[in-house]
Amino acid sequence: MNEKAAALGMEDTHFVNCCGLSADGHVTSAYDIGLMARELSVRHPEIHNYCTIWMENIIHRTKRGDSEFGLANTNKLLKQYPYATGLKTGYTAAAKYCLAATAEKDGVKLIAVLMAAPDIKSRTADAQTLLNYGFSVCRVYKDKDPAPLPELAVKKGEKEAVPLVYESDMSYVSTSGEDLGTVTKKIRLPKSVTAPVKKGDTAGKVTYYLGDKKLGHINILFADSVKHAAFADYFLSLVQKLFLLA
């Protein structure tokens, strides 16, 4: 657990046990809990299918037989906050009432972490305040209509052109309430390249701007490989052109 925490950048966390109960040297921080919650949500999003269940009946099987009892979710946000998606409550006498709360609204996903709240009511209210503030200032830009990419001319290659592809989708998160409706983009590509060309190598990039502010860029990659043309390739090309002219 400590090795994984270090790998996630949880610099203020040290585990002494795996149950979460208070112990000397067993410590963490709100920021580190946020990192852990993000890792869980991103790597295992199916967790939200379970942590959003409000009530569930559980069958307890023992040698004496089966007994059924009901469990209620301790995360009150699920009933009081329409955008809540989880995630985990906690309580010990030393840590008080804690919560890693997740929520989603208009494509924005947020995590709010509360520690040492005096009671459940305060924990829930403070989490809503944090999440409302986050949603009020966070904006997400996604390039939903990327420009079609041309084929790039290839010199001295067995093919005269090579197709191009975007490396990934573009997304940008603003935390200052900016109007992202005026984002512009510029594609930079050479007029041609010289063989050999390797599939997956960078051919150029598209850069995104908000006014004079650069938001980021996405690489444009070669979608295929093109070998350097041999004499036979030149000869075959010449023959084909002669037949077309005949």
Image (cartoon, rainbow, N blue to C red):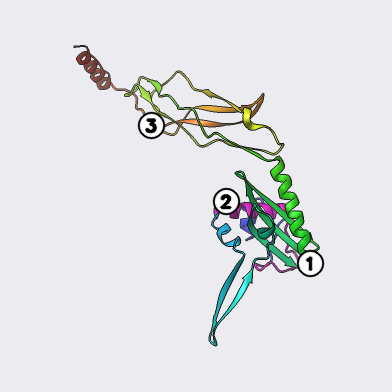
From mark 1 to mark 3, how far is it between C-alphas?
A: 60 Å
Query: Which residue is label 3 attached to?
Result: 224
Please indicate, yes or no, whether residue 11 appears anywhere in the rendered image: no
Badge number at residue 42: 2
N-terminal-most mark, 1 or 3: 1
- Vertical order, 113 against 177 (above or below): below
Q: Quadrant of residue 160?
A: top left
**Of callouts 1 and 2, the N-terminal one:** 2
Residue under the point 55% across and 54% down: 45
Q: Amino acid at mark 3?
A: Asp
Q: Which residue is mark 1?
A: 94
Look at the image and give the residue range highlighted in magenta: 17-43
Q: Are marks 1 and 3 in contact (CB under 8 Å)?
A: no
Residue that appears at 23% across and 20% down: 236
Viewer-proximal residue, 9 or 211?
A: 211
Task: Give the residue type that dot 2 points to.
Answer: Val
Q: Position of residue 75 (x, y in %)?
A: 68, 62
